[in-house]
Structures are given as C-alpha cells and as structure tokens.
Image: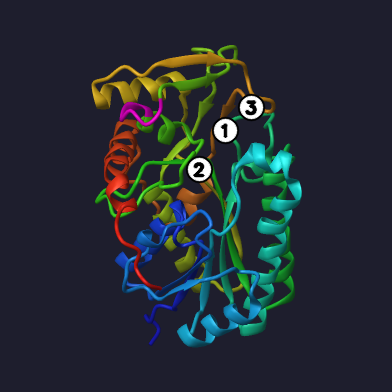
C-alpha cells in the first residue's frame, strides 16, 4: 500500500489557517483529525465528519489517545498565539503557548512514533531584514517574543530530527490573507489585526475606518510593503510539504511561503475600494515600533523543491474571497453549536 495516505492530526484546525489546511487535506484524500481548544478557533470551521477533539496540545494523555484512536502518522501544527503586540506585553504567554506546548506535542509525537511534523512558523523569525527579498538562510533575529517563540520551536524540531527517526517541514509565512474560494472557511477571529481582514470589515460597516500606521517608509508611496499570500495557496503548500516529508523521511525542510512580491498598505486599500465600489476612510497614524519598510519573501526554494504553483496570486482575488467570507461570517456565528 505504497500509495496509502497517513492519517494527519491538525492542531489548531478550527482556526484560520488550520481550517484551510484541513480542507486541503480532505480535498486531496488524506484522513484528518483535529484538536483545538476553541480559544480562538470555531467549531463551525471544522467539517462535521472530521474527528474533532476539544482540548489542549499540552494534554499528553489526550494526544496519546488521539494518536492511538486515529492511527496518526503525521502532524500539522497550527495551534498557538499570533498577536505581535500582545507577545511584547505578555511574553510568558507566548513562550508557554508557542514554545513549551510545542515541546510537549513534539515529545508526544516522538514517544508515539509519529515521524512527520509540519510547523506553522513565521517571517517574524527574520526580524527586520537587511535585504529583501528574504531568503531562508537570511539572519534570524526576531525583535519580539512572538518571532522568538516560533524560532525556538524551529530549533527544537531541527534537534529532534537529528536525534530520532523524525523529519520536519517548517514553513515561514509572510502575510496570509483571503479565504477559501468556495467560502467554506475564512478568518473568523473577532478583533483581528491583519490589514485585508480589517479592510473588508470596514467595507461592510463593521469598522468605521482603517488605520494606516506610518507614511514615511522607504517605499514608493511611503507606506509599508508586504508580501500577501492567499491562505488556500498556503494550505496547498502544506499538503505538498507533507508529501515531500514522507517521500524522503531522512530530510527536513524549511521554506518561505509567499509570492515574492509585495503591495503597500495604500495599494491594498485601493484594491478593496475597487472590489467593493466604496471608498474606505483612511486614518493616518504614526509608525509602529519595529515595522520594517518592506517584507518580501524569496520563494525560489519552495518553488524548486515542491511542485507548488500558486492558484490565487492576485490581490483582487484575495480581497474578493476575504469579502465573500466576511459576508457569510455573521450567519455562521449565529448557527447553533454542533456537539463535539
């Protein structure tokens, strides 16, 4: 049964990126289970026929039960905390949720013989880069506990892979945006800080304005430039990474996930205006500490390593899918809870 697909456990599978990974795995025929504590995720984001465990990845007994019940052979790890300013205000929360709990999960995986592990990392591992686009071998110098907590987990995975029959795929995300093209899931967290999410909320009257933090960056229009990747393209990259890990179990991989080009804050807001036919109110505010002028990925490695061809590399498409999801979100939140 060389073509048999290993059962995959998705941690944080009721969250934004995790729920898209669940759909991508299901669409590709992989058996999937989910663990999520629902602190920021939503039960409605997980299809009802997917085995769902409400719990914490720090609960080793629960993890071992899931591994046994579902025959887990691989893990995609999305569970964690992701708000940069909060990490500065409460660093111990981030070292607990993102680093210590990941250590527990990795330890349980090794003990149970789960040998393939894909980790949701971040471009924040690079800090403020000296050059752009950013390559995987660029210096890693996080400037906040969020980035450091993720980099520490990357280091643990590399060390474990050297000591055990275990390999890891580390994917460093740039700016993830958009939603499932069929509007099956999307970014649902209240109070999200991602620009495109904020902008489509404003376009639908859920916010009064959009703040533009800084107009004096060294960029063509003075606002920060970021590399936006559609969440479904990112989810597809996870599935291809899993296939690569299984095909060569002696090798781990670390790859950037972006498109290799950027858009400024004002360009993104103009795109939302064009898609919605409205004009968002922009409020110009001061720069936030630590915001780099430009953050763009070098995607040469992932494109040459995997047969990954983005399908949604278009800013208007990303905005359109995010907007469609935002329109559905209120109805989904009002849906009666489904028993776990």
The residue under label 1 is: 133
Quarter containing the C terminus = bottom left
Q: CA distance from mark 3 to mark 1?
A: 16 Å
Name which residue lies at 69% across and 43% down: 87
Q: Is residue 71 magenta?
A: no
| Quadrant housing residue 170 | bottom right
Please name whichever residue, 302 or 277, is drawn nearer the observer in this view of the structure. 277
The picture places residue 252, in percent across and down from the top left corner, at 61, 64
Pointer 3: residues within 10 angstroms few (<14), some, or many (20+)? some
Q: Is residue 244 left or right of residue 167?
A: left
Quadrant for residue 209, please give it.
top left
Question: Can you say whether 261 is above or below 94 in the image?
Answer: above
Q: Label 2 near label 1: C-beta < 8 Å?
A: yes
In the rendered image of this protein, does residue 308 appear above or below residue 47? above
Element under label 1? loop
Q: Which numbered marker is on residue 291?
A: 3
Q: Nearer the viewer, residue 7 or 18?
A: 18
- Residue on which the image places disc 2: 299
In this view of the protein, which residue sits in the foreground, 197 or 336? 336
Q: Say which mark, if any, is on residue 229.
A: none
Label 2: which secondary element: loop
| Residue 123 place in picture, x, y as percent | 60, 42
Whether tag 2 and tag 3 are in contact, CB under 8 A, the answer is no
The secondary structure that most of the magenta stretch takes on is loop
Question: Considering only order in the chain, which callout, 3 or 2, is on the residue closer to the N terminus?
Answer: 3
Residue 291 locus on image (x, y percent): 64, 27
> Magenta span covers which residues?
202-207
């Amino acid at each position: 049964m060389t073509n048999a697909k290993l059962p995959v456990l998705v941690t944080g599978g009721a969250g934004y990126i995790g729920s898209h990974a669940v759909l991508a795995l299901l669409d590709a025929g992989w058996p999937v289970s989910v663990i999520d504590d629902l602190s920021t995720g939503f039960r409605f984001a997980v299809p009802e026929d997917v085995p769902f465990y409400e719990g914490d990845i720090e609960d080793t007994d629960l993890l071992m039960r899931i591994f046994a019940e579902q025959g887990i052979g691989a893990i995609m790890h999305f569970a964690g905390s992701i708000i940069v300013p909060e990490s500065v205000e409460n660093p111990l929360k981030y070292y607990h949720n993102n680093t210590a709990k990941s250590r527990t999960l990795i330890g349980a995986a090794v003990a149970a013989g789960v040998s393939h592990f894909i980790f949701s990392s971040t471009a924040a591992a690079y800090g403020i880069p000296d050059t752009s686009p950013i390559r995987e071998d660029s210096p890693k110098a996080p400037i906040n506990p969020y980035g450091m907590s993720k980099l520490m987990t990357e280091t643990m995975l590399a060390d474990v892979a050297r000591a055990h029959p275990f390999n890891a795929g580390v994917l460093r995300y740039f700016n993830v945006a958009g939603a499932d093209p069929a509007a099956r899931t999307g970014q649902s967290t209240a109070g999200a800080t991602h620009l495109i999410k904020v902008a489509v909320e404003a376009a639908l009257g859920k916010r009064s304005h959009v703040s533009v933090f800084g107009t004096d960056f060294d960029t063509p229009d003075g606002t920060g430039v970021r590399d936006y990747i559609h969440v479904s393209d990112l989810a597809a990259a996870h599935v291809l990474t899993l296939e690569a890990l299984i095909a060569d179990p002696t090798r781990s991989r670390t790859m950037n996930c972006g498109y290799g080009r950027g858009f400024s804050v004002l360009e993104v807001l103009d795109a939302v205006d064009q898609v919605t036919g409205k004009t968002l109110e922009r409020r110009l505010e001061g720069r936030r500490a630590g915001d780099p002028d430009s953050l763009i990925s070098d995607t040469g490695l992932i494109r040459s390593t995997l047969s990954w061809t983005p399908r949604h590399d278009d800013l208007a498409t990303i905005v359109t899918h995010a907007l469609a999801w935002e329109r559905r979100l209120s109805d989904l939140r009002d849906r009666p809870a489904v028993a776990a």
